[in-house]
Image (tube, grey):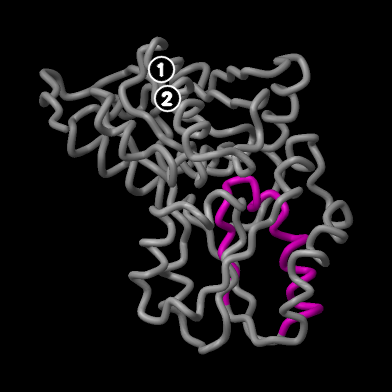
Amino acid sequence: MTFDPAKTEYDQRPIGVFDSGFGGASTLRNMLRLLPDESFIYFGDNANAPYGDKTEEEILLLAENAADFLMHKGVKALVVACNTATSAAINALRRKLDVPVVSVEPAIKPACEAPGEGRVLMLATVATTKLARYRALQARMPDPERVVNVGCSGLVERIEAGLVGEADFDDILREKLSPYEGEKVDGIVLGCTHFPFIAPAIKLYAEAHFTGECRLYDGNAGTARQLKRVLSRERIAAEPGTKPEPRVSFFTSGDADICEPIFRRLLEIPIYE
């Protein structure tokens, strides 16, 4: 896909961001910090969350619907802030849309390149770990067998309910991670944008049950940097110092009265960086 160079130096249109629900708020936090002059329109497909238990065809349709919604809002670029939607739909979206499309990717490359020989646990939705795009990414790692894919069904649903406390996930983490009890784990990839919000719970469990460094990785900072590069390359960055208001407009396929307060809280609560 090709883009016509911008006729002017700056572009004040908003950037569209979508996720299956609230997870993309963790990606958006990074973009808000790195791009202080940009405004964003966020669409959470909360009525259809989670995407991780759906077929590839279902995820593709939902992603296209979310993208269409944001395109009708007049966005200048689109960020797919959902690992599962990226795996199922990113190529189709880039072919279809006439704006730049940036996606979040699981941070297994930095995890695999870090010092250590222990396992790298890739925590994600079941769908992400099975889709061809992610499998191809794993195959490109120097030692693909070092990466252990862990489909963590149940976590997204609780985060969608607004739960982020360390004690809210003990039972699911025990169920999914107990097979690796006592093993050396040097990296844990948070392969779903919902998971950074429960990083303290994951870190606490890992340090109690694994050996190794148990370093946490996610792709959000890399997504923000890529978006900044794309805005500069396409000459569609906002004018510096404009201080746009509102910075973030929120839309959802769910109940806005319930969803927006949770979304706004997730944008503000301290999470691991």
What range of the chain is rendered magenta? 187-210
Give the residue pinned by disc 1.
Answer: 68
x 46%, y 25%: residue: 40
Q: Is residue 57 left or right of residue 256?
A: left
The vertical placement of 49 against 251, above or below, is: below
Disc 2 versus disc 1: distance between alpha carbons?
6 Å
Give the residue pinned by disc 2.
Answer: 64
Callout 2 touching callout 1 (CB < 8 Å): yes
| Residue 136 position within the rendered picture, expressed as x and y whole percent measured from the top left | 36, 61
The vertical placement of 223 against 240, above or below, is: below
Q: Amino acid at mark 2?
A: Glu
The vertical placement of 255 against 196, above or below, is: above
The vertical placement of 128 against 82, above or below, is: below
Q: Quadrant of the N terminus?
A: top left
- Residue 78 versus residue 131: which sits nearer the camera? 131
- Residue 241 versus residue 71: which sits nearer the camera? 71
